[in-house]
Amino acid sequence: MLFFTQKLNRKLQCAAFAVAITCQFPSAEAQTMQDRYLAIPADSLSLTSVDVATMRNRKELEVVPWEVISAFGKQELGIDPLLITSIDIAAGMPTLNGPEFGAVIMTSAPVDIASLSNKMFSELSTSTKVKGMRFRTLRDNNVPIKIVQSEPQKILVGTDGTLRKMMSARAKPSRLVELANASKYPFRTVTAFESVRPLADGAFADASGNVPPQLVDDIQILIDELQYFVTESDIFASFGKLEMKLVANDSASAKKLAGALERLRDNGMVIGEQAILQALESEQQISPQVKAASIAYMERLKKFLSKAELWKINDSEIAMQGEFAYTVPTIGILTGLLLPAVQAAREAARRMQSSNNAKQLMLGIHNYESAFRRIPARATKSPNGKPLLSWRVAMLPYIEQLALYQQFHLDEPWDSDHNIKLLDKMPATFKHPSYVGPEGHTVYLAPYFEDTIWNADTAKFGDITDGLSNTIALIEVNDAHAVPWTKPDDLDLHEVELLDCFRPTGSNVAMFDGSVRFISPDIDASVLKAMVTSAGGELIGN
């Protein structure tokens, strides 16, 4: 799962650990693909399947403390984890509310979610729409996660959006499910690259200038032709067995993909060799003997990789298989080839989510302006003029956060004994998907100095004579400039340079018309400053 990285509470982590290593179970051969996979949404980005039942009586697991795991699971979860026979986890496209995922857990005997720990889960509820369906909600978790049961030996776990899809009937399994079901290994993950292709394609187009020219065309072929990426393994077999597959649309596409992989391998080795030689030459502390040995090893490795048959084509699939000991070079090569595209896709997805956040904030500002005929003041103030709370708090009712707004003491500063407790309740709209720092901080700030609209306590859209589409309202700053979201603190352009606040690869900026643009850090500083003023009359090109 590319996109599910939320931290669970300590007890859930312990319980998940118990489930993850519980592999000595009664056989589940009677389970059909319909039993396990019918609930998997067809638009899932990835599917991870674990056939824990096939691990029964493994010699390698003889010393696992099954008795302790069983007792611990009953105590912490409320059910015996040794009853689990299979786990299938589907990840979907993240939404503004966070990650989307769902899991199907099959058991060898009937279980009842009513027996689950009350410390971890809410009271049992019964569906009014689906007969016999009951559910509970995981307590104290940032992302609402429910556990649902309508059959005695099947449990569904996930977020609301994915669970709704999982409980809808499907006429036939998706290609994602077919690939997972066809695997001969007990651990497998299938990723639908086709689902993120537009993001990967756009991101690679932006980043291609930083990629060695001899790799650009073949990486583009990889992005264009790859449909699914499959990893299958049996980590408990001797040496551990691993197989990876690249799945194309048809045999012609697979041959084209294989040709691109071969060229990427060959050109990648040349580029890597040149980089290593340059590093060895520039490093004075490495002795001549070690340098010579390193070069000799590099030559031997290059010959091995050139001669080794790293993959074979089987119709529309390119398969790479073998024991871990012999597939390490393959893993390294594939990682090097796929990483730029995957990283680019992830960065593009985060940029898109942040852009959506900024659009939601601008929609809130427009709603506020419609209600009061002015934009929100940068800070609410006490009768003696002391700043109390940020504009972000004043805008809460206009981004569907009225209940949170009503919890604030509006006549107290942001860090009062009461208001400071609300810092951790920051809406997801204010959280940047790539932000790493203290909780309750936001990177969406309003830039201000004398010639900006945010410098006035009362201002309306009509005061922006430069045009709403030409004037920056909010800037997505880097993590170092993030501020507590309730604090009346923004981007004082007397104290900082705008470009110093940009994120390393560029920042989204929201214009007063509600549009969002991505601006490179290479932009001319005078042009950027002109885009911040509201009535400067500057002429700004595209």
Image (tube, grey):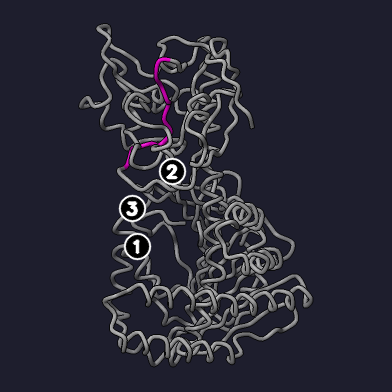
Depth check: 482 or 145 in front? 482
Residue 59 spot, x, y in % from top left: 39, 93
- Which numbered disc flags the more N-terminal residue, 3 or 1? 1
Circle 1 packing at 10 Å, graded few (<14), some (14-19), many (20+), is many
Residue at figure coordinates x 36%, y 55% from the top left: 8
**448 sits to left or right of 359:** left
Can residue 484 be seen here? The reply is: yes
Q: Give the residue pinned by disc 1.
A: 77
Indicate the amino acid at tag 3: Asn
Q: Secondary structure at mark 3?
A: loop
Depth check: 323 or 124 in front? 323
- Which numbered disc flags the more N-terminal residue, 2 or 3? 3
Q: Give the residue pinned by disc 3.
A: 118
Circle 3 packing at 10 Å, graded few (<14), some (14-19), many (20+), is some
Mark whose residue sits in front, 1 or 2 = 2
Residue 88 spot, x, y in % from top left: 53, 68
In this picture, which residue range is highlighted in magenta?
A: 439-450
In the rendered structure, does residue 256 fall within the stretch colored magenta? Answer: no
Can residue 51 be seen here? The reply is: no
Report which quarter residue 309 is drawn in: bottom right
Residue 382 spot, x, y in % from top left: 28, 11
Q: Give the residue pinned by disc 2.
A: 503
